[in-house]
């Protein structure tokens, strides 16, 4: 289904060099847009967005060879959003949070890599959610 593939890759963004980084950068305006919401509302938005993303990724996966294709970047959007849950928006928090999320997403320390073994759309999404949670915790420690 071409529409799901287009959604899962954010159109052409998933085909740019360093697609995970580009997808995370493309998420920052959305981070700003939901930053004024209460933390619970942010979580509800991210949960709803994740459910929609799950179905788009699930439908798109058969069109790719890899079990976690780098072109699919909706998972980066979710992970990046998780990074900023309940974080006061500032240029400093935005830059530090962005780099922390990318660091955890790329290196996948603390067993994050094992989450991918779940497979399917959940495996694609959950490793980024966990990377976002780690980034959120470290960001909270740094900005206090």
Image: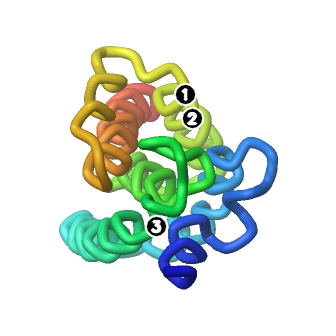
From the viewer's perspective, is the residue at label 2 or at label 3 nearer?
3
Q: Are marks 1 and 2 in contact (CB under 8 Å)?
A: yes
Mark 1: give few (<14), some (14-19) or many (20+) Cα within 10 Å: some
Secondary structure found at label 1? helix
The vertical placement of 2 against 108, above or below, is: below
Q: Residue at x 22, y 38 (%)?
A: 118
Percent across and percent down for residue 60 are: 46, 67
Tag 1 residue = 106
Q: Quadrant of the C terminus?
A: top left
**Mark sitting earlier along the chain (1/3):** 3
Rounded to the nearest angstrom, the CA distance separating label 2 from label 3 is 23 Å
Q: Where's residue 47, x and y in %?
A: 24, 68
- Observer-side mark, 1 or 2, equals 1
Mark 2: which secondary structure? helix
- Give the farthest residue toward the right: 17
User: Label 3 belongs to which residue?
Assistant: 60
Front position in the image: 111 or 91 = 111
Image-quadrant location for residue 116: top left
Say whether residue 51 is left or right of residue 37: left
Residue visible at 53% across and 40% down in the picture: 97
**Residue 144 visible at all:** no
Pointer 3: residues within 10 angstroms few (<14), some, or many (20+)? Answer: many
> Can I make out residue 59 in this image?
yes
Across and down, in percent, residue 109 comes to: 39, 16
Please say which color scheme the image uses.
Answer: rainbow
The x and y percentages for residue 21 are 67, 45
Q: Residue at x 42, y 42 (%)?
A: 67
Q: Which residue carries the number 2 mark?
A: 102
């Amino acid at each position: 289904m071409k529409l799901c593939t287009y959604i899962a890759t954010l159109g052409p963004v998933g085909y740019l060099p360093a697609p995970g980084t580009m997808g995370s950068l493309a998420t920052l305006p959305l981070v700003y847009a939901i930053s004024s919401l209460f933390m619970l509302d942010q979580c509800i938005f991210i949960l709803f967005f994740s459910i929609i993303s799950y179905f788009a990724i699930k439908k798109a996966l058969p069109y790719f060879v890899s079990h976690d294709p780098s072109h699919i970047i909706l998972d980066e959007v979710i992970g990046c959003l998780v990074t900023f849950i309940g974080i006061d928006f500032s240029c400093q928090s935005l830059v530090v949070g962005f780099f922390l999320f990318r660091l955890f997403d790329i290196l996948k320390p603390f067993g994050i890599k094992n989450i991918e073994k779940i497979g399917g759309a959940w495996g694609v999404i959950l490793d980024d959610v966990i990377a976002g949670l780690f980034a959120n915790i470290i960001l909270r420690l740094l900005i206090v």
